[in-house]
Image (spheres, rainbow, N blue to C red):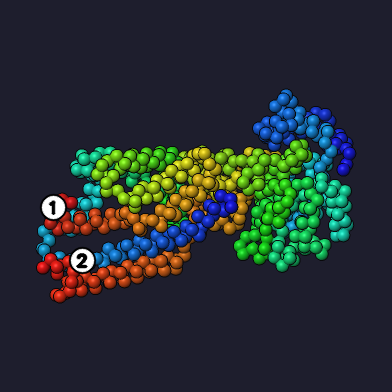
Amino acid sequence: MDEKTVYDHLRESGFSRRDFMKFCGLLSGMMGLEFLPAAKLLGAAAGPSAAELVAGALKSKPRVPVIWLELQDCAGCTEAVSRSQSPSLVNLVLNKITVDYQETLMAAAGFQAEAARREAMARYKGQYVLVVEGSPSVDADGVFCVIGGKSGLDILRETAADAAAVIAVGNCAAFGGLPKAKPNPTGARAVSEIIADKPIINIPGCPAIPEVTTGTIAHFLIMGALPATDGLKRPVTFYGHTIHDHCLRRPFYDAGKFVERFDDKEARAGYCLYKMGCKGPTTYNACPSLKWEKGLSYPVQSGHPCLGCSEPDFWDGGGFYKGQSAPVEQPTIAAAGISAGVGVALGAVLAGANSVKKRKAGKPGASGPDESAK
Amino acid sequence: MDWTTILRFFRGPFFVVSLLIFIGGMTYRLVRVLLLGWSRDRVKSRGSKAMGVLKSYAKGVLVLPFIPWVKRTFGNNALTYLAGGLFHLSLLTVVVFGTPHMLVWKSLLGFGWPTLPFPVIDWLSAVGIIALVLLLINRLTHPVLKLITRAPLWLNWILVFLPFVTGYAMTHHLCLRYEVFFSLHMIAVDLLLIWIPFGRISHFLFYFFSRTIHGAQAGKRAVNP
């Protein structure tokens, strides 16, 4: 393991002490350390502030190596991270502190790249964090995604075997994403379905928010463990609230003021996008608070309904522009017709049988309540 | 299995099956009623059947809700009358004019309509829940009602109450996560859809039959419905 601490690396990058403390404050604030039980465990309750806690960790701990795999993906999460303009955090965590292997960003290619991965694995055995972007394909022994003559599935298993923790970035890695959408021709799976014997965390999104990705890596670096997660293995710090909870258009929802078409005057007035299919009420993510592009905006703010991209199987969720409350599937006209037809037929048959029975009961000589009454 | 998957199942395949059972069941009930047969009308009409039907509906919509004391039920048990009336008002308004519900109708029918603001729907939902609780207490304490209430009627109450209370809890983020209550809401709604053709809640359809027929009979005899 590299003996230099994170602080040493930052100082070499030209960081002043003031920059460093600002960075620590940013990290602690973003990770919500004040509220985390882990922070108390590390002594936050005993006196030092969360920023001081982060500073202490960065000054004493060596960098955490990261191996970043790309499987069945579009590299969108990598693009999001690499193009993020957020101050210091992404650049520092990913470019200066951690990443040892990243297929899209690294200069090496082909055999050299694969050799770099194996070298990093051997050098940091049991210590590196494995970030996976894209879903592994399991059908036909993973032949649909082959890198350097090896299936993505094999590479994932091989690399995860010696990892300290696994971070599944993006909806594809976390839940299967687009490759898993019906009819799932490659047999795409979530990473957590393949790797079961390692600490694993999901950072879903399409793409994942860069600050959430790097914030989770930073958490591992500072705390030495993955952050607390919800039932879908997502960090609660970033996925604790729905888009709807913190939506800036929420007052319009409450007032019943909705956009009816993308080009109507309500759309220009910034009304609620619920009727346009916004999946905000059932989507847990940090978009409204972290936003994108230096906190400039996020889809709902820009006038587009939330697609629910941090939820499992969102591609098969019944249509992006269909109401969030609408059923995922509807019966076809034919099925409804058949159902009604069965009802009519059954009703007619039983009514007919009843009629025949009544007629028989009414005939002279037939036994029945009327006859006995006579 | 996580709640998102459960929710998807009860908003997807199970909802479809429930709706098909509802459609088939209600069609069956309708056919059975229609094929009970109509006795031949041998008496000369003394008035207008159409006018009788019109008066019958006008009384149902305009008179009974606002001047309830013209009906004996109100005098006998005002609580049942008021709670029952408010419950029906709440149910119809929430199911038809609540935005999330309208979007369900839109997905099924292909067209939508304007909806009411959230606070209005919210308060009406609360009114519906309180009315249902009052009706339950009344049913539990009234000796005659207690005597004639059998299991299907208790099931009616439960299956109507559950969608109300889960929907309310869902929008207010009470206790459990949104998708948990959403799943419970959908399970309750699906079960209700399946149950409706088998129970007395089918009166939502037969109400119109009885009001039309009684109105027509009254109109024919030139008396007020």
Toward which corner of the image does residue A341 lie, by quadrant? bottom left
Q: Which is more N-terminal, label 2 or label 1?
A: 2
Residue at 41%, 56% in the rendered image: B193
Front residue (pair A180, A96): A180
From the viewer's perspective, tell me whether residue A71 is left or right of residue B81: right
Percent position of residue B21, x then y: 41, 61
Dot label at residue B38: 2
User: Image height check: is A22 above or below B6?
Assistant: above
Residue at 72%, 25% in the rendered image: A46
Q: Disc 2 residue type?
A: Trp
- Of all chains, the one bearing label 1 is B
Q: Disc 1 residue type?
A: Val
Q: Which residue is mark 1?
A: B223
User: From this viewpoint, is residue A269 visible?
Assistant: no
Disc 2, SS: loop
Residue at 65%, 54% in the rendered image: A175
- Of all chains, the one bearing label 2 is B
Residue at 79%, 30% in the rendered image: A56
Front residue (pair A316, A370): A370
Q: Are marks 1 and 2 in contact (CB under 8 Å)?
A: no
User: From this viewpoint, is residue A258 visible?
Assistant: yes
User: Image height check: is A349 above or below B115?
Assistant: below
Mark closer to the observer (1, 2): 2
Percent position of residue B82, x then y: 29, 40
Percent position of residue A194, x then y: 71, 56
From the viewer's perspective, tell me whether residue B54 is left or right of residue A101: left
User: Image height check: is B184 above or below B120?
Assistant: below
Mark 2 burial class by Cα count in 10 Å: few <14, some 14-19, many 20+: few
